[in-house]
Amino acid sequence: MAPWRGRRNHGGRRNHGGWRGHGSVALVALIAGAALTACDSAGVGQIVPVQSAYKRIIARNLHSVVQIDSERSTGSGVVFDAKGDIVTNAHVVDGAKSYQIRTSAAARPLAAHMVGSFAPDDLAVIRVTGRRADLAPVHWANSDRAQVGQIVLAMGSPYGLIDSVTQGIISATGRTVIGPTIAGRSPSVIADALQTSAAINPGNSGGALVELSGGVLGIPTLEARDPDLGGPAEGIGFAIPSNTVRDIASQLISKGRVTKSDRASLQVTGTTHTPPQGNSDGVTIDATKPGGAAAVAGIKAGDIITGLGGAKTPTLADLDELLIGYKPGDRVKVDVLRDGAREQFVVKLGSLSSGGP
């Protein structure tokens, strides 16, 4: 059961498909009455603190989670600031030229345009034009403090059902998961992902995973899929941690692109190399960033990277996943096939950024 290639570490229409696991979050929360109510001596149910917390947090945050409609898909988004910026998944909005934002508070859809996108972390920011009074920014929690067993609520618009909520727990932290491949780009690789048991359904990518104190811990982005049955694997979903969301979204808003991240990069673009006679065996370098990490080390376009740090890299996804384990400035040995001859280079890794190799 590993369609998301994870490891510890490290509606309506198309509904943002393409993950090894769909993207999205939660349907209406079904709360077990026995767990959340108590009976007095007369047998009358009384509301206990957990249910009160659910109601309070839903009322506080649900109006800050919106539905995003484009000509290609329907997904969800989270209001980032008072300027009308909305953060969502890159695969929800990528390829579209215009968007409509729907909220239960607004009488009619709001128009929005692209601010910036960063496919490696599957994050993007769009901005509402015109009226913004109905958009209230969320409060962000510190995802570094997320704990296994912590109760969370997932909010979004699965299958176009706006203002839907489910509940679950944080099942694990520090996961690395492989996301969808957007045409012409490397697959998204989510580092330090939060695993949750909250239900995730198509149309809810880009929504909010909220802790009971009211802070948003992350953006739910995909569900695992059963490799045998082909359907969703119940109780296994993943969210991009809030600290990553805030960092990437802030750069996209201020500069329109990501200029620096704490993720390491060879600073190349490439494609999986598959020889006619067999399975994929490496990554063909299509271009190197001038003055970038690989170029400085002597790697050039046309080389085939077959290994990194002693581990094989038969596909581009394998290479990207291995790089998650390093930081900018680390030195790593890179195995290369050049004109049929095997060579090895020591590369001082650079920082992953958007816009070019």
Image (tube, helix red, strand yellow):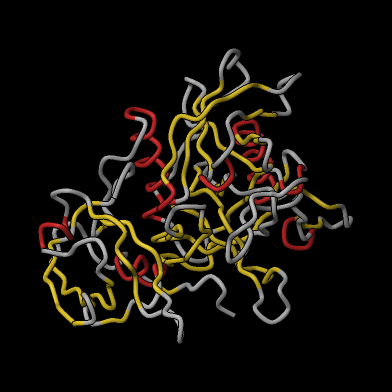
Residue 289 position (above or below residue 349): above
The mark tally for this picture is 0
Q: Give the x, y percent position of residue 59.
A: 66, 34
The residue furthest bottom is 277
Depth check, front residue: 289 or 40: 289
The percent coordinates of residue 248 (x first, y second) are 37, 41
Q: Quadrant of residue 174?
A: bottom left
- Dividing the image into 4 quarters, which one contains the N terminus? bottom right
Q: Position of residue 339 (x, y in %)?
A: 22, 76
Give the residue at x 51% y 31%.
126
Q: Is residue 283 above or below residue 186?
A: below
The residue located at (37%, 31%) in the rendering is 256
Q: Residue 250's quadrant in the figure?
A: top left
Q: Is residue 34 above or below residue 108?
A: below
Q: Splitting the image into 4 quarters, where does residue 53 fall? A: top right
Question: Residue pushed farthest top?
Answer: 130
> Residue at horizontal 65%, vertical 48%?
204
Residue 99 in the image: above or below residue 50: above
Residue occupying the point 64% across, 38% down: 56
Is residue 329 found left or right of 65 in the rendered image?
Answer: left
Viewer-nearest residue: 323 or 62: 323
258 or 281, which lies in front? 281
Residue 129 is situated, as x and y percent measured from the top left of the image, at: 56, 17
